[in-house]
Amino acid sequence: MQVDFYFGDYNYPRDTHLKSCIKYDDYMEITEVLKWPRMRKTWKATHEDVLEASKYSCIFEISADKQYIRRKNKFLN
């Protein structure tokens, strides 16, 4: 899914908007990801789509309350 790209090694260190959305403990709200043009217009992704994709991702994870998302491993410079 597109979210793997956003949190992947190529995009994550370069994406200033994504970094500006990250809050406590490297998490950001899933609703913020769903606002991004490609997620909204191209994929028409829903909250449930992101939760389902997280089951198969080695790049990102979801918080216990299923409201937040973060990269599984911190990016090392």
Image (spheres, rainbow, N blue to C red):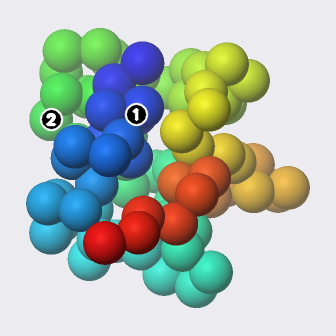
Which residue matches tag 1?
A: 3
Closer to us: mark 2 or mark 1? Answer: 1
Q: Where does residue 72 sit, x and y in percent of width and height?
A: 62, 52
Which amino acid, by three-letter code, is at mark 1?
Answer: Val
Image quadrant containing the N terminus: top left
Which residue is rendered at x = 69% and y = 48% of the image?
Answer: 62
Which residue matches tag 2?
A: 37
- Count of numbered marks: 2
Which amino acid, by three-letter code, is at mark 2?
Answer: Pro
| Residue in front for this viewpoint, 16 or 51 | 16
In the displayed structure, 68 sits above or below 53; it is below
| Residue in front for this viewpoint, 28 or 76 | 76
In the displayed structure, 18 sits above or below 2; it is below
| Residue in front for this viewpoint, 44 or 68 | 68
Local packing at callout 2 (Cα closer than 10 Å; few below 14, some 14-19, many 20+) is few
Q: Where does residue 7 sit, x and y in percent of width and height?
A: 39, 46
- SS at mark 1? helix
